Amino acid sequence: MRHALLALVSAGLWAGVPTIDDLLNLKRLGGVLISPNGRLAAYGVTEADWQQDAFVRHLWIADTATGKTWQLTRGKKGAGAAAWSPDSQWLAFTSDREGGKSQIFAIRPDGGEAVQLTQSDTGVSSFDWSPDGKTIAYTATDKRPEDRKNHLGDFEVVRRDYAFSHLWTFAVAEALKAPVAGKQLTKGREFTVGGFDWSPDGKQIAFSGTINPDLVQGGTADIYVLTLQGGTVSKIVGQPGPDTQPRWSPDGRRIVFGSAMGNPRYYHANRRLAVVSAEGGAVRSITDSLDESPQLLDWTQAGIFFLAAQKTEMHLFRADPDAAEVTRVSRTPSGWTVSVTPDGSRSAMLIDDAQQLAEVYVTGLPAWSPAKLTDMTAQVRDWTLPVSEVISWKSKDGTLIEGVLTKPAGFDGAKQLPLLCVIHGGPTGIDVPQKVHAGSYPIDLWTARGALVLRVNYRGSMGYGQKFRQLNVRNLGVGDAWDVESGVDHLIAKGWVNPQKVGVMGWSQGGYISAFLTAASTKFAAVSVGAGISNWATYYYNTDITPFTIQYLGDDPADDPEIYRKTSPMSYIKQAKTPTLIQHGENDRRVPIANGYELRQGLEDRGVPVEMIVYKGFGHGVTKPKARRAVLEHNLLWFNHYIWGDPKPDFVNPVLPKKEKEEKADPG
């Protein structure tokens, strides 16, 4: 029986169906940057390195005219953030390949050895070239003195003990000869530097800054301008709510930035793009006509470009800063990662959908005719994969809800199938049609076995406007559960689903909704709770983003205990009956692990079958291949038992591949 389970997990269900390791071994694109001259596109390719148990990202280049591609960086250590020099002759990137701290390197796009440029004591966080290409500015945290640690040991004073981030610069010509530490431009504890941008003349740097690096202070982000000559810093925007990501106008007279426009409750409200004089003054929103949150790209000679979700599609827009008019540029979905040349004439993007993995495309602007430069989808051409489509239904209160339904290949609707619901996080995330699914849940293995998979874009999801996004304010869990359960009922009514074989799972906010359903619903045969909230009071007092709770629930647990009772899974634990798997990172600060232990004990006290697995060394996300394999396998075996009747898994003594037992080597 164990060998049958192992065959299911590791060898696939039948020819053409991917295994868990197949999914993890896929090479995937992430990030794309078009060169300033528009001739090249740099992009990242990430793959699993099982030997060092890491996902390693390397840079590749594509010629936008010929489509020729080549690998630029190599080695055990990958490449992080990247930026083209203004003359397109260098590509700079961060890497921890030397000494373990992130440093800046530069490499010619036609290859050769990368040159290390920085020797920062604390490592480089972010960087950018000056407009003339002679200087690079970067951010790094202050170096902590060792005296306290040497004398008193290591400790932290909560919400007082911070390493502030500041701006540094260095001359590129000097750094090409030998790595440099650079010159520190900002200091002190008045602010910590976030995103920044050089002025077109290279004489100033605009940046956002919060009063300290604590995530709870995100709403204090304001816009500052540093004048390099003299080193003076001026705050030009100071209003409630976050103001971030400044970008200069091509003439250097104005700055555009992302803004909550004074709204202190910004987690679920629309953000705006706003413009202000480079000297400060009145702040003017230019995207009021858009009922979504824009993601600023850049202010080019052709206008201000940004991205915004439109239901399950992402599109490229252009804003006129004078008329405050918004125009959609993309005639087809642009993808979620887009780069535009400084003159606004060309763009590179990553597009993935139900027909393909993420691929690099380029197009002229404002014309829209994306041409594909890569073929990552060739990796899965021989796989037997499901098909996905967007469906809709009405929730309990009449709200129209959309979701992505993934069907087995050859689905005809003639018989009732198992249904597995996978719930995204956020809550302002969104699910979209995909060709291959390789998150925490082995969707493609379940559909190969004959299951339907529904991913619900419940109230609060992005892409549907502010009113929809705020429908779960003071209604978390309750309204979300309506949306999931009504989606299940919709498919049952079609005759497609066996109501006795329905499961639900999710991570983060999806884990919270799953926890709510395991406690408050009897509709499901099995549940998996990934890094989920079980008690909002426990969460509020322990999370690293307490303002999130206040903005969604309206008050703290002491002043409004009733809203915390209404929305907490533990309030309904007495009626829980559903077998539940709990998965949590040991060091999770976003959803502290106490939430997992509380739910586990509550279920055990009621005699509900429950397993809790703690992934050692991880925070809110599980980011290494072997542990990701474990997350996928644990979910696969859990639902295979409760949905299909396979043997109950023994997570303590898992069945391991014979090669791993004998050789102590990884089969990846």
Image (cartoon, rainbow, N blue to C red):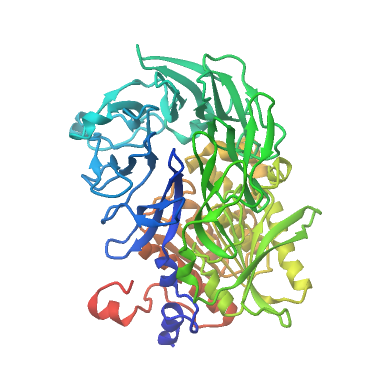
| Residue 426 relative to residue 588: left or right | right
The answer to whether residue 121 of the structure is visible from this angle is: yes
Q: Position of residue 260 (x, y in %)?
A: 61, 30
Up-down relation of residue 229 to residue 441 (above or below): above
Q: Residue furthest right?
A: 398
Task: Residue at 62% x, 41% y: name it.
Answer: 366
Task: Residue at 58% x, 36% y: name it.
Answer: 305
Q: Position of residue 455 (x, y in %)?
A: 63, 62
Q: Residue furthest front?
A: 66
Q: How many marks?
A: 0
Q: Position of residue 133 (x, y in %)?
A: 34, 30
| Residue 38 relative to residue 98: left or right | right
Task: Residue at 33% x, 71% y: name it.
Answer: 668
Up-down relation of residue 552 to residue 526 (above or below): above
Q: Position of residue 406 (x, y in %)?
A: 63, 69
Position of the N terminus, as image quadrant, is: bottom left
Of residues 189 and 369, the one drawn nearer to the viewer in this rendering: 369
Of residues 312 and 661, the one drawn nearer to the viewer in this rendering: 312
| Residue 279 relative to residue 160: left or right | right
Of residues 214 and 72, the one drawn nearer to the viewer in this rendering: 72
| Image-quadrant location for residue 35 | top left
| Image-quadrant location for residue 414 | bottom right
Of residues 407 and 65, the one drawn nearer to the viewer in this rendering: 65
The answer to whether residue 145 of the structure is visible from this angle is: no
